[in-house]
Image (cartoon, grey):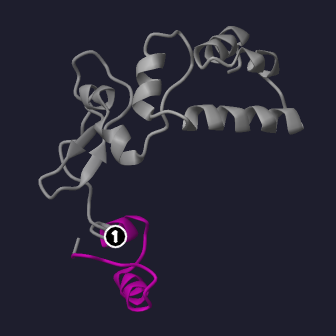
Protein backbone atom coordinates (compact mmCIF):
# COMPACT_ATOMS: atom_id res chain seq x y z
CA UNK A 1 0.00 0.00 0.00
CA UNK A 2 1.29 3.44 -0.87
CA UNK A 3 -0.62 5.12 1.94
CA UNK A 4 0.58 4.31 5.43
CA UNK A 5 -2.94 4.23 6.91
CA UNK A 6 -3.95 1.42 4.55
CA UNK A 7 -0.75 -0.51 5.15
CA UNK A 8 -1.15 -0.28 8.95
CA UNK A 9 -4.80 -1.35 8.64
CA UNK A 10 -3.75 -4.37 6.57
CA UNK A 11 -1.10 -5.35 9.15
CA UNK A 12 -3.61 -5.02 11.98
CA UNK A 13 -6.27 -7.00 10.09
CA UNK A 14 -3.97 -9.95 9.40
CA UNK A 15 -2.68 -9.75 12.98
CA UNK A 16 0.85 -8.80 11.91
CA UNK A 17 1.50 -5.40 13.55
CA UNK A 18 5.21 -6.27 13.50
CA UNK A 19 5.23 -5.60 9.73
CA UNK A 20 3.77 -2.09 10.02
CA UNK A 21 7.16 -0.34 10.09
CA UNK A 22 8.19 -2.01 6.81
CA UNK A 23 5.43 -0.77 4.53
CA UNK A 24 7.65 0.58 1.77
CA UNK A 25 10.62 -1.67 2.45
CA UNK A 26 12.92 -2.57 -0.42
CA UNK A 27 15.84 -4.93 -0.84
CA UNK A 28 16.22 -7.77 1.62
CA UNK A 29 13.73 -6.25 4.08
CA UNK A 30 11.15 -5.85 1.31
CA UNK A 31 11.66 -9.44 0.24
CA UNK A 32 11.23 -10.59 3.85
CA UNK A 33 7.94 -8.64 4.13
CA UNK A 34 6.66 -10.12 0.84
CA UNK A 35 7.53 -13.62 2.09
CA UNK A 36 5.74 -12.94 5.39
CA UNK A 37 2.65 -11.67 3.54
CA UNK A 38 2.72 -14.65 1.21
CA UNK A 39 2.81 -17.03 4.17
CA UNK A 40 0.05 -15.14 5.97
CA UNK A 41 -2.30 -15.02 2.98
CA UNK A 42 -1.45 -18.61 2.04
CA UNK A 43 -2.53 -19.73 5.51
CA UNK A 44 -6.25 -19.20 4.87
CA UNK A 45 -8.71 -19.51 2.02
CA UNK A 46 -9.65 -16.80 -0.44
CA UNK A 47 -13.15 -16.88 1.02
CA UNK A 48 -11.76 -16.17 4.50
CA UNK A 49 -9.76 -13.16 3.30
CA UNK A 50 -12.56 -11.82 1.12
CA UNK A 51 -15.01 -11.93 4.02
CA UNK A 52 -12.49 -10.45 6.46
CA UNK A 53 -11.47 -7.54 4.23
CA UNK A 54 -15.05 -6.80 3.16
CA UNK A 55 -15.42 -5.05 6.53
CA UNK A 56 -12.09 -3.18 6.37
CA UNK A 57 -11.28 0.08 4.58
CA UNK A 58 -8.10 -1.23 3.05
CA UNK A 59 -6.67 -1.64 -0.45
CA UNK A 60 -6.97 -5.42 -0.74
CA UNK A 61 -8.67 -7.32 -3.55
CA UNK A 62 -8.28 -10.84 -4.90
CA UNK A 63 -6.22 -11.45 -8.02
CA UNK A 64 -8.60 -13.23 -10.36
CA UNK A 65 -8.20 -15.35 -13.46
CA UNK A 66 -9.74 -13.96 -16.64
CA UNK A 67 -12.75 -16.29 -16.29
CA UNK A 68 -13.26 -15.27 -12.65
CA UNK A 69 -13.05 -11.59 -13.55
CA UNK A 70 -15.57 -11.98 -16.38
CA UNK A 71 -18.01 -13.70 -13.98
CA UNK A 72 -17.55 -11.03 -11.27
CA UNK A 73 -20.89 -9.42 -10.31
CA UNK A 74 -19.51 -5.90 -10.85
CA UNK A 75 -18.23 -6.80 -14.31
CA UNK A 76 -21.60 -8.40 -15.17
CA UNK A 77 -23.66 -5.52 -13.77
CA UNK A 78 -21.72 -3.04 -15.92
CA UNK A 79 -22.33 -5.21 -19.03
CA UNK A 80 -18.63 -5.32 -19.82
CA UNK A 81 -18.86 -8.47 -21.97
CA UNK A 82 -21.34 -9.35 -24.70
CA UNK A 83 -21.58 -12.95 -25.88
CA UNK A 84 -22.42 -13.27 -29.56
CA UNK A 85 -24.72 -15.92 -31.05
CA UNK A 86 -21.66 -17.94 -32.15
CA UNK A 87 -20.28 -17.92 -28.58
CA UNK A 88 -17.53 -15.37 -29.16
CA UNK A 89 -17.23 -12.58 -26.67
CA UNK A 90 -16.62 -8.91 -27.29
CA UNK A 91 -15.74 -6.40 -24.64
CA UNK A 92 -17.69 -3.22 -24.08
CA UNK A 93 -15.99 0.09 -23.39
CA UNK A 94 -15.19 0.51 -19.67
CA UNK A 95 -16.80 3.94 -19.59
CA UNK A 96 -20.57 4.26 -19.38
CA UNK A 97 -22.61 7.29 -20.44
CA UNK A 98 -25.87 7.29 -18.47
CA UNK A 99 -28.33 5.05 -20.31
CA UNK A 100 -26.44 5.05 -23.63
CA UNK A 101 -25.52 1.58 -24.90
CA UNK A 102 -22.05 1.92 -26.40
CA UNK A 103 -22.09 -1.61 -27.80
CA UNK A 104 -21.44 -2.34 -31.43
CA UNK A 105 -24.44 -3.34 -33.56
CA UNK A 106 -22.53 -6.08 -35.39
CA UNK A 107 -19.98 -8.76 -34.69
CA UNK A 108 -16.30 -8.37 -35.40
CA UNK A 109 -15.24 -9.32 -38.93
CA UNK A 110 -13.48 -12.61 -39.61
CA UNK A 111 -9.75 -12.46 -40.24
CA UNK A 112 -9.24 -11.13 -43.76
CA UNK A 113 -12.95 -10.52 -44.33
CA UNK A 114 -12.39 -6.95 -45.51
CA UNK A 115 -8.77 -7.40 -46.57
CA UNK A 116 -9.23 -6.89 -50.29
CA UNK A 117 -11.41 -3.81 -49.80
CA UNK A 118 -8.88 -2.26 -47.41
CA UNK A 119 -6.03 -2.92 -49.85
CA UNK A 120 -8.03 -1.43 -52.73
CA UNK A 121 -8.79 1.64 -50.65
CA UNK A 122 -5.08 1.95 -49.87
CA UNK A 123 -4.41 2.09 -53.60
CA UNK A 124 -3.30 -1.46 -54.39
CA UNK A 125 -4.17 -2.80 -57.85
CA UNK A 126 -6.10 -6.06 -58.20
CA UNK A 127 -3.02 -7.79 -59.64
CA UNK A 128 -0.90 -6.73 -56.64
CA UNK A 129 -3.58 -7.91 -54.21
CA UNK A 130 -3.69 -11.28 -56.01
CA UNK A 131 0.13 -11.56 -55.75
CA UNK A 132 0.06 -10.73 -52.02
CA UNK A 133 -2.56 -13.42 -51.45
CA UNK A 134 -0.68 -15.96 -53.60
CA UNK A 135 2.56 -15.25 -51.71
CA UNK A 136 0.79 -15.72 -48.35
CA UNK A 137 1.49 -12.14 -47.29
CA UNK A 138 -2.21 -11.44 -46.71
CA UNK A 139 -5.26 -13.61 -46.25
CA UNK A 140 -8.58 -12.85 -47.83
CA UNK A 141 -11.37 -14.87 -46.25
CA UNK A 142 -14.10 -13.84 -48.66
CA UNK A 143 -14.43 -11.56 -51.66
CA UNK A 144 -14.95 -7.96 -50.64
Is residue 137 part of the magenta span, yes or no?
A: yes
Q: Which picture quadrant has residue 37?
A: top right
Residue 90 in picture, x, y percent from top left: 28, 47
Give the camera-side residue of 130 and 55: 55
Relative side of 89 to 124, left or right: left
Q: Position of residue 3 (x, y in %)?
A: 70, 13
Image quadrant holding the N terminus, namely top right
Residue 120 shown in magenta: yes
Identify the residue at horizontal 41%, vertical 79% (top origin).
138
Occupied quadrant, residue 36: top right
Q: Residue furthest left?
A: 85
Q: Nearer the viewer, residue 26 or 109?
A: 26
Q: Locate the C terminus and report the quarter of the image it occupies.
A: bottom left
The magenta segment is: 116-142
| Residue neighbourhood size for the residue with mark 1, other residues' Cα within 10 Å, grouped as few (<14), some (14–19), many (≥20) | many
Q: Is residue 5 left or right of residue 108?
A: right
Kindly identify the residue that appears in the image at 11 percent across and 53 percent down.
85
**SS for callout 1:** helix
Q: Quadrant of residue 43?
A: top right
Amino acid sequence: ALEEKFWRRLCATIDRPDLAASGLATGADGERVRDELSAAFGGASLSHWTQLFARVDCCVTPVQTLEEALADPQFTARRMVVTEADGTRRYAPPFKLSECDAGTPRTAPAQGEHGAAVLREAGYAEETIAELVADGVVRISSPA
